[in-house]
Image (tube, rainbow, N blue to C red):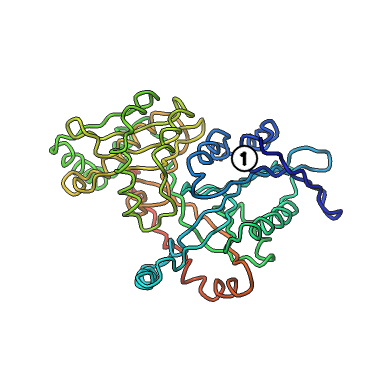
Amino acid sequence: MTKAIDCLIKSESIYSYKLYNSIIDVDLDDWKQVCQTSDSNIYMDIRLLLIIEKTMADFGKFWYIIFYDQNCNPSACTSLSTFKTDLGVVAGKGTKEFITHVRQLLPSFLYLNVLFCGLPISIGKNHLIFEKNANQQLIIKLLDNIMNTIAAQEKTKLTIYKEFTSQECYQLDILVQLNYLKGESLPMHSFKAKFANFSEYCAALKSHYRNDIKRSKRKFEKTGLRIVQLKDTEKVLQVYTPEIHQLYEAVVQKSENKLETLPISFFRELAINFPGQLIFTLVYKDDKIVAFNCSLCTQSSVHYLFCGLDYSLNAESDLYFNLMYAALDEALKQNVPKIDFGQTADTFKARLGSYQTPLYMYIKGTGYLLNWIIRKSFYILFPNPVLVPSYNIYKL
């Protein structure tokens, strides 16, 4: 069993911390005490962290930290990870083309080992949670000292804190004083779930948007495709085969902004560890699954996680659109106030009525030279994403 390293902080700080390199060894009571104060605690759930640690151990390392005040009360917690990352993942189209040409000669160009405050999965949430009375800036300074030490030990090239809302940045902006650059990540698309189901939602739409959906659904029905909603763990495990996982891999390969490719074991472990909370929206052509969407349901929201698609059927059936309509129908039936659609397919999600929440990250290079290069090329490698306009889709 891994032993936690209990470190007392220098006299100018009132905080101490415990550092773990396996979630199995974390003090669960203290961890949960901090996480229960956060709306995003599902992403700091011990079960999810264990799944990621188990299924992605071949791709990186993980650390977990609990901070304590002078009375030994848990005040904050976070998860850290290393991951080999494509630095051009959020670059603009022209920059990506340049990087592609360079990689024909230098395949490893701009693939760097990164230390994240957060986890190496694309969910648009951060993994740094504070108890409401914590002195966040003192903890952030201490956390950054810890990360600098780990970065030196692991020989990582970049340190990145991700993904924070503008409100959370009020405290995180102290990182700019610590030599970090602040940039925009991809925004989160969310939906106010004020309808009982998809039919009720459609009835509230202006005719133009409602007719677009009707045309799309007719294309879908003509191809003989059908929808199945699945929450039963045993049935999910039966259908989530390597062939189905290839649909997910096809989406990852087509994505303009891909950080990771999750193994099949991640999805199967997710079904096992979150029974009744995981919703698989499946599209069948005869007896074959040709698309799926995986969502995670909590008391406060439904989170679209990952999807898979047979692109050869997309044009004739509007497969992706209809997959999202069916997933939205099931999400609305969960009777939650909000649905998180994820960070891609901006215009389509905006036309569904979603709103965007800008997200931010803080980046620092390791060593003077790399940090200088990052500063000089920052807005080329990390351009601000173009926010799509909101659409007035509902009848008055």
* Residue shown at the point (38%, 69%) measured from the top left: 103
Q: Nearer the viewer, residue 124 or 261?
A: 261
Residue found at the very far left of the displayed protein: 222
Task: Determine the residue positioned at 39% across, 70% down.
Answer: 99
Q: Position of residue 199 (x, y in %)?
A: 29, 33
Rendered image quadrant of residue 169: bottom right
Query: Which sits in the foreground, 201 or 332?
Result: 332
Residue holding disc 1: 22
Point out residue 105 in the picture as x, y percentages from the top left corner.
37, 73
Q: Nearer the viewer, residue 3 or 346?
A: 3
**241, 206: nearer the viewer:** 241
Q: Quadrant of the C terminus?
A: top left
Q: Is residue 233 above or below residue 124?
A: above
**Quarter the N terminus occupies:** top right
Query: Relative to 336, is 393 above or below?
Result: below
Whether residue 139 sits left or right of residue 313 in the image: it is right
The residue sitting at 50% across, 32% down in the picture is: 298
Element class at badge 1: loop
- Horizontal side of residue 26 vs 388, given as left or right: right
Q: Quadrant of residue 293?
A: top left
Residue 200: % across, % down: 32, 33
Mark 1 residue crowding within 10 angstroms, few (<14) / some (14–19) / many (20+): some
What amino acid type is highlighted by mark number 1?
Ser
